[in-house]
Image (tube, coloured by chain):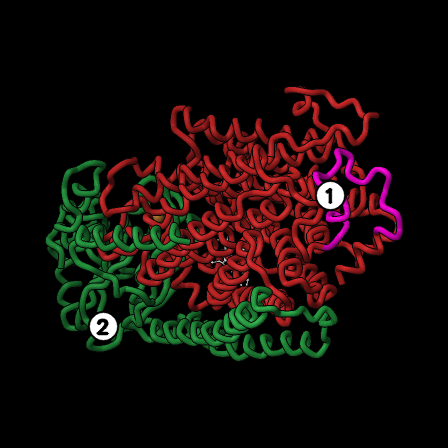
């Protein structure tokens, strides 16, 4: 993805070169690239931590790390993957694609865009520095539950400051998306004409603006509890540790949809392309996404059924959680109907989208099971939950990101990746991810708690299998980087529309896409053509 | 594609080579235990019901996907039907049917939940307090209380690079110095709280877990079926710091007769020892 701009298109911009090009970047493509490279870096760092975890869990007994460091690994792994890998990857894709898809030259607020990206390296440097200070990195889980999280040492203020920076970055990025979509659409591009990726991102942006401040509030209260003598969450001072969980999950559940909604958008573009058929039920897809977003605000307590809530509360959160499976189901059915009577081919982006379809659905099933409160009393905080959220996040969100990268790389770089290596990457990832996470369902049901560095011998076999899967999956991702590198360096020249069935304004641009995407804006005829093919 | 087959073969080979390393194979431990209490059986049956619903929906959805992927392949000359863009009827069907299934599921779930919350008529109350990293048990009104923590052998073995083999330790990490002792066929109320951070008390065979939270008292109950005497094991389920993985729960279920004898013995002779903060390790029951 390194050198994706074609400077010959326009000469009235004064883009600096070299390092300054990136430090002072205001171009949506440059910033998109920065986000994607950053996300990829965090993906590998977070992945390395995951491999430390799986190496320790390969056999019973402690072989490599101290339990405290193990807890730091689970905590840091989650923070890095959620806030450092998946969220920035989505913002990177939004930066690249939204202007191209709505017919705009760039994002609406380019300098803000620069700022929201450059906050991230500082945020994660602070967070990663905690690994090297006395007392070590935060080890209370990414959920930061007090009182445990308040026991942290010097890492505590650094972690909280880092989370604040990440939150500001996300909010600014989200504002940029909203403003771009609301104001920069080309004439003729109505809201209900937009590709679904724009729609799901628009909804995601509103979720971000709504809940990142809630997280900021929660961690600030932790901070004042720790340093300034307040007792929001300290029972001894009249506070309530459970209140933190309510506030955290009021952020936390919408957050999981922040991670997955853009994936719905990407998959909703790839499946029609490779089925050579318009998306089935476009409008119901939009409404389903919006209802998921709405419902995501009223299900938070399903993460804390075991804290001892009143019966009525438990029933309410059980029903609302079950309800959220309905719009999710509508989406899956629509994707199936899109493929029905299509003309399907299996290039790498489609393979990843299909794996998403199958494996995300498995995560949805376990989600449905977790919604049943009495059963959740068994599942909660066991490996069953770990299996659930990894199915929705890895072959869910992460596969969708990879599908998107393979899908749009030709448009970005003007070059094709190696289909053969792409497919190899796909198969290794898909097999690896299932060997890694499927056995964790068994472990959880058999009674293995999550977040433990060592386990009783009855859990030995499936842990070993899971660890083998982890190493296969982890190392396969190096191939992903290689495939992209090879494509950008020496891939074959890509045609303007490398995928026969690809539709929408992004595919009406020349390849590689010009530096200022739509400048001048697309004519009404071009917009109408892009839109008409879509639905 | 040969790469793919080769990597699958390699994986299988690795797995086969690795498996003898694990002394007793537990490949069969795949499902939630049915358990030994009234509630655990209900919970297990809810779990199986929702599981089979998922299987049924899965057969339908995955069947549909696979059918499409096979029948509508471009390589087999499939022509797309580009007029098929939406169908209000289909949308209504695949909204309503899931709702109906969910209602069917919600009813028994709500019923079990109500039973779980019904803590009336309990015959024995035990206050359980979580500490970093051990449990304290207090038989309310019986003047019997003691700490319960990881047994010595497990504790020595679990040290980093101890050189000891976990497989050689009976009930590695699932054994304690002083187990909780309860009578069978008795509705036991567990009152949960914690001293320092949040813990969670979980015995899978009893079907329940609940958080032990500083400043709050939570309640659960269990009633072990008559005839199901024996030793049941569980672990702390809520991350509680460095040794979260090392604070197991062991419950010894005995006949009512035996329980009365045990309780009396604790109340007289043993009280000073078990009430002290660091109880001398006693042989596990
Ligand atoms: C059908 C839709 C879904 C339902 C009904 C559902 C339900 C649940 C429930 C009840 C829990 C709590 C389990 C427990 O801790 O006992 C949970 C955990 C979780 N879910 Fe889902 N879920 C769904 C989809 C998703 C999606 C789409 C994502 C994200 C992409 C997601 C991510 C997570 C995460 C990250 C956790 C665990 C958080 C933690 O404790 O660290 N879920 N889910
Ligand atoms: Cu949730
Ligand atoms: Cu614990």
Q: Which residues are magenta?
A: A503-526
To which chain does the residue with label 2 belong?
B
Is the magenta region chiefly helix, strand or loop?
loop
Q: Quadrant of residue A277?
A: bottom right
Question: Contact, CB < 8 Å: mark 2 with mark 1?
Answer: no
Q: Nearer the viewer, residue B54 or A184?
A: A184
Which shade is chain A?
A: red
Q: Is residue A444 visible?
A: yes
Q: Secondary structure at mark 1?
A: helix
Q: Which mark is residue A294?
A: none
Indicate the secondary structure of the residue bearing disc 2: loop
* Closer to us: B26 or A418: A418
The answer to which image quadrant residue A489 occupies is top right
**Colour chain B is painted in:** green
Residue A388 picture location, percent across and down: 46, 58
Graded by Cα atoms within 10 Å as few (under 14), some (14 to 19) or many (20 or more), the crowding at tag 1 reads many
Dot 2 corresponds to which residue?
Answer: B184
The answer to whether dots 2 and 1 both sit on one chain is no
Could you tell me which chain the residue with mark 1 belongs to? A
Q: Residue at x 80, y 57 (%)?
A: A531
Does the image show residue A217? no
Residue at left offset 45%, top offset 49% = A424
To which residue does mark 1 refer? Answer: A177
The answer to if A188 sits in the magenta stretch is: no
A227 shown above or below A346: above
């Amino acid at each position: 993805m390194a050198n994706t701009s074609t400077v010959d298109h326009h000469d009235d911009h004064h883009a600096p070169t070299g390092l300054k090009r990136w430090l002072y970047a205001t171009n949506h493509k440059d910033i998109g690239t920065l986000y994607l490279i950053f996300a990829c870096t965090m993906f590998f760092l977070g992945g390395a931590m995951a491999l430390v975890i799986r190496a320790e869990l390969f056999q019973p007994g402690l072989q490599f790390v101290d339990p405290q460091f193990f807890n730091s690994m689970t905590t840091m792994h989650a923070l890095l993957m959620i806030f450092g890998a998946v969220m920035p990857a989505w913002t990177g894709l939004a930066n690249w694609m939204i202007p191209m898809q709505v017919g705009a030259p760039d994002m609406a607020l380019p300098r803000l865009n620069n700022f929201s990206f450059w906050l991230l390296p500082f945020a994660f440097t602070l967070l990663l520095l905690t690994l090297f200070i006395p007392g070590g990195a935060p080890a209370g889980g990414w959920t930061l539950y007090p009182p445990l999280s308040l026991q942290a040492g010097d890492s505590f203020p650094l972690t909280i400051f880092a989370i604040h920076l990440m939150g500001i970055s996300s909010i600014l990025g989200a504002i940029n998306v909203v403003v771009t979509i609301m104001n920069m659409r080309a004439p003729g591009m109505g809201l209900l004409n937009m590709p679904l990726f724009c729609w799901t991102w628009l909804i995601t942006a509103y979720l971000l603006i709504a809940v990142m401040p809630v997280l900021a509030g929660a961690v600030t209260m932790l901070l004042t509890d720790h340093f300034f003598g307040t007792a929001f969450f300290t029972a001894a001072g009249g506070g309530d540790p459970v209140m933190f969980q309510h506030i955290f999950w009021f952020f936390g559940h919408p957050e999981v949809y922040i991670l997955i909604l853009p994936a719905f958008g990407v998959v909703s573009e790839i499946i029609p392309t490779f089925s050579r058929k318009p998306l089935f039920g476009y409008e119901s897809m939009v409404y389903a996404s919006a209802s998921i977003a709405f419902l995501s605000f009223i299900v938070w307590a399903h993460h804390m059924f075991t804290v001892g809530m009143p019966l009525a509360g438990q029933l309410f959160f059980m029903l609302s959680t079950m309800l959220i499976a309905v719009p999710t189901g509508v989406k899956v059915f629509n994707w199936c109907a899109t493929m029905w009577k299509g003309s399907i081919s299996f290039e790498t982006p489609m393979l990843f989208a299909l794996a998403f379809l199958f494996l995300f659905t498995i995560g949805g099933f376990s989600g449905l099971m977790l919604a049943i409160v009495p059963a959740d009393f068994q599942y909660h905080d066991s490996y069953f939950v770990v299996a659930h959220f990894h199915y929705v996040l890895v072959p869910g969100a992460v596969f969708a990101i990879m599908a998107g990268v393979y899908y749009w790389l030709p448009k970005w770089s003007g070059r094709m990746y190696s289909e053969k290596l792409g497919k190899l990457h796909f198969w290794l990832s898909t097999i690896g991810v299932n060997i890694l996470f499927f056995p964790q369902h068994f472990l959880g049901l058999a009674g293995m708690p999550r977040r433990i560095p060592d386990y009783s011998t009855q859990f030995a076999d499936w842990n070993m299998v899971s660890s083998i899967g982890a190493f296969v999956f982890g190392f396969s991702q190096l191939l992903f980087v290689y495939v992209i590198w090879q494509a950008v360096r020496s891939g074959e020249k890509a045609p303007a529309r490398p995928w026969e069935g690809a539709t929408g304004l992004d595919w009406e641009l020349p390849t590689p896409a010009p530096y200022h995407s739509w400048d001048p804006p697309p004519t009404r005829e071009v917009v109408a053509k892009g839109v008409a093919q879509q639905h | 594609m040969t790469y793919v087959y080769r990597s699958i073969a390699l994986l299988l080979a690795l797995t086969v080579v690795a498996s003898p390393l694990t002394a007793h194979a537990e490949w069969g431990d795949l499902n939630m235990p049915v358990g030994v209490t009234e509630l655990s059986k209900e919970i297990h049956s809810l779990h199986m019901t929702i599981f089979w619903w998922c299987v049924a929906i899965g057969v339908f959805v995955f069947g549909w996907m696979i059918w499409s992927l096979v029948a509508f392949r471009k390589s087999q000359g499939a022509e797309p039907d580009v007029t098929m863009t939406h169908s209000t009827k289909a949308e209504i069907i695949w909204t309503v049917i899931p709702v109906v299934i969910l209602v069917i599921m919600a009813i028994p779930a709500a019923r079990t939940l109500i039973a779980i919350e019904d803590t009336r008529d309990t015959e024995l109350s035990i206050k359980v307090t979580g500490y970093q990293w051990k449990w304290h048990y207090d038989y309310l009104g019986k003047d019997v209380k003691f700490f319960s923590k990881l047994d010595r052998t497990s504790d020595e073995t679990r040290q980093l690079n101890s050189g000891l083999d976990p497989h050689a330790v009976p009930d590695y990490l699932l054994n304690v110095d002083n187990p909780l002792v309860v009578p069978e066929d008795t509705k036991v109320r567990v009152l949960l709280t914690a001293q320092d951070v949040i813990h969670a008390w979980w015995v899978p065979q009893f079907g329940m877990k609940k958080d032990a939270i500083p400043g709050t008292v939570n309640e659960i109950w269990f009633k072990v079926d008559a005839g199901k005497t024996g030793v049941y094991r569980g672990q702390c389920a809520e991350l509680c710091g460095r040794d979260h993985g090392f604070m197991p729960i062991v419950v010894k279920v005995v006949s009512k007769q035996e329980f009365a004898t045990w309780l009396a013995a604790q109340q007289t002779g043993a009280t000073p020892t078990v009430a002290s903060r660091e109880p001398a390790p006693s042989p596990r029951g």
